[in-house]
């Protein structure tokens, strides 16, 4: 770290091992670290362990000897993330709440709070990297291929990356666990957090049923034959193999290949019918400069889900601003509403929402 005055960094601490080690590393590197716990969900709602998470975050801050703050973002989280989550499912699409959580909460209102409070940086325990090159900040994949979280971060822009640190970018998970254990951080034995950002692991259908009523509808084949029923297209996603009832035996597994939210009709088909090699992407967000103008095309790699296989593709910007994606091979379970993220080698170019 350059300069005589230590840089101030607000570390988002969830109570887990990753954010704990992020704070540890930054302190060891000479930063003036403040731990910040963001409360985004009501305690005990839907299995949320907010009280336990906060306790671990506080204990870690005390062990590291750093200041600790709690920010109450429950209202903003419900309006900006959860309402979006329900609205997308109700419209028949498949949202990604973790992408929205990073955009609106961690690198939205938390970032804005930190800048207003005079911090030089925010930091999190994401497995990703930031690099300044040719007067532009690059978002990079994490070194640990099994933990890389760059997919969730593609909506970060230049101003945010300029003031963001990802201390775990070059580390692998076992190294992080060992660092936590060696320093006897309270979270070193905590299990991996799973599920929805800030909420945890929940039954998605039960979670959705809190606002969306079950409504029986038809299951049909691509040829239009009625072959079963379901409890509502909102509870199912493209590529799903279960959650609907068939009255006909096909011999091979059947998957959701299309949904009609207005008619509440589900279309099922074989594995091959669930494969696509072309689709459109909208609501584009580029990490740096837009690499395309109307009519241009570039070759890059595509990922349509967290830790999904990276596949070569060609993207072309149409006159109406959509991206037309042509994949080198057919991809399974391309779901409208999900994020398509584009990579060039180790760098995240940006992404958008699948139409």
Image (cartoon, helix red, strand yellow):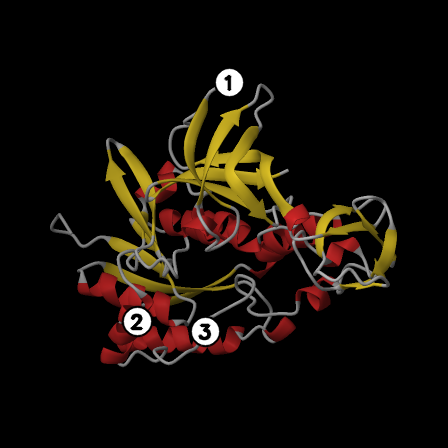
Marker count (numbered): 3
Say whether residue 42 is left or right of residue 91.
left
Per the rendering, the mark at residue 174 is 2
Dot in front, 3 or 2: 2
Residue 77 position by quadrant:
bottom right
Task: Tell me the SS state at disc 2.
Answer: helix
Disc number at residue 54? Answer: 3
> In which quadrant of the rendered image does the C terminus lie?
top right
Who's the residue at 34% across and 57% down the image? 10
N-term mark: 1 or 2: 2
Pointer 1 residue: 295
Task: Locate residue 288, reporting x and y percent.
Answer: 38, 33
At horizontal 51% and vertical 26% (from top left) the residue drawn is: 316
Question: CA separation, marks 3 and 2?
Answer: 24 Å
Q: Residue at x 73, y 51 (%)?
A: 269
Tell me the mark number nearer the camera, choosing from 1 and 3: 1
């Amino acid at each position: 770290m350059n300069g005589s005055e230590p840089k101030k960094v607000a570390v988002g601490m969830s109570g887990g091992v990753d954010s704990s080690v992020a704070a540890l590393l930054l302190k060891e590197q000479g930063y003036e670290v403040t731990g910040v716990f963001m409360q985004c969900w009501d305690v005990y709602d839907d299995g949320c362990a907010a009280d336990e998470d906060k306790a671990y975050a506080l204990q870690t801050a005390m062990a590291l000897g750093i200041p600790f703050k709690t920010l109450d973002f429950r209202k903003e989280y419900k309006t900006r993330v959860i309402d979006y989550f329900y609205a997308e499912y109700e419209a028949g699409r498949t949202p990604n709440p973790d992408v929205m959580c990073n955009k609106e909460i961690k690198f939205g209102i938390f970032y804005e709070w930190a800048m207003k409070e005079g911090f030089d940086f925010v930091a999190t325990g994401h497995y990703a990297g930031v690099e300044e090159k040719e007067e532009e900040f690059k978002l990079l994949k994490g070194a640990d291929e099994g933990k890389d979280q760059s997919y969730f971060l593609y909506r970060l822009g230049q101003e945010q990356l300029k003031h963001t640190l990802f201390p775990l970018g070059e580390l692998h998970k076992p190294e992080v666990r060992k660092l936590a254990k060696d320093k006897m951080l309270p979270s070193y034995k905590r299990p991996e957090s799973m599920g929805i950002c800030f909420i945890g692991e929940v039954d998605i259908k039960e979670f959705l049923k809190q606002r969306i009523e079950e409504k029986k509808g038809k299951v049909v084949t691509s040829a239009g034959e009625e072959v079963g029923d379901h409890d509502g297209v909102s509870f199912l996603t493209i590529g799903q193999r279960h959650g609907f009832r068939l009255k006909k035996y096909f011999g091979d597994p059947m998957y959701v290949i299309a949904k009609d939210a207005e008619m509440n009709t589900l279309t099922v088909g074989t594995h091959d019918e669930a494969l696509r090699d072309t689709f459109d992407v909208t609501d584009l967000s580029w990490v740096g400069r837009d690499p395309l103008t109307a009519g241009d095309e570039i070759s890059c790699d595509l990922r349509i889900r967290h830790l999904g296989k990276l596949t070569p593709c060609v993207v072309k910007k149409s006159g109406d601003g959509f991206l037309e994606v042509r994949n080198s091979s057919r991809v399974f379970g391309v779901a409208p509403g999900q994020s398509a993220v584009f990579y060039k080698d180790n760098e995240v170019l940006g992404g958008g929402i699948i139409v």
